[in-house]
Image (cartoon, rainbow, N blue to C red):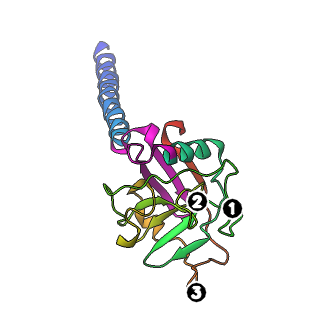
Amino acid sequence: MTFPVMRSETMRRRTMMAAFLATPCVVMSSMSEAQAAGDLENTVYLDLKDGRVVIELLPELAPKHVARVKELCRKGFYDGTPFHRVIDGFMAQGGDPTGSGTGGSGLGNVPGEFTTKRRFLRGAVGAARTNDPNSADSQFFIMFAPAPSLDGQYTIWGQVVSGMEFVDKIKRGSGGSGMVSGPDRIVHMRVAADVH
């Protein structure tokens, strides 16, 4: 009579051991995801209709722009804003709550932080501005393709490290201006360290 109890106890222990051994794999997987994202305080999750885009922030190149982006993300400013100007083969521009291309955060301008250390390649995230090099605010653009003419002329504050395939699906504009009718919108844009 004790043998079935022993067998049952042995099975219970094996099940517990299997569960225990499986647990580190889950933890390791989570750690790997966090490590893959890098420094979570300097990572942004840009959620689009088709999926999540992970952007590495570059505070060593553009500390004032990165600080502004993080501040706006933490206020939920970008949520629901449109990609109002999207030019196929060039870039997708968003961050204007009015969708007109003239709106901003109301926090004032950020001075240009231009660099020659990084180039505007596919996935680079830059600060949109007017002809005044010190007029950036909340608007930004993500490159579909390299644009050497922008190098050293616009601030690069981030780089897409995953999810570029979702950026590629953003609705394109028409005409030379690239303004979009019925544009795609940002679902959420958050600092990764704030996402639980």
**Is residue 90 toward the left or the right of residue 146 in the image?**
right
Q: Amino acid at mark 3?
A: Gly
Residue 194 x/y as whole percent? 54, 37
Q: Secondary structure at mark 3?
A: loop
In the rendered image of this protein, does residue 183 appear above or below residue 96?
Answer: below
For label 1, the residue is 103
Q: Secondary structure at mark 1?
A: loop
For label 3, the residue is 175
Q: Amino acid at mark 2?
A: Gln
Q: Amino acid at mark 1?
A: Gly
Q: Residue furthest bottom?
A: 175
Residue 172 x/y as whole percent? 54, 78
Q: Nearer the viewer, residue 5 or 52?
A: 52
**Is residue 124 toward the left or the right of residue 67 in the image?**
left
Q: Nearer the viewer, residue 111 or 189?
A: 111
Which range of residues does the magenta coloring cover? Answer: 36-64
Instruction: Report if residue 45 lies within the magenta region.
Output: yes
The circle drawn on residue 139 is 2
Q: Quick one: quadrant of the N terminus?
A: top left
> Residue at position x 43%, y 39% from top?
40
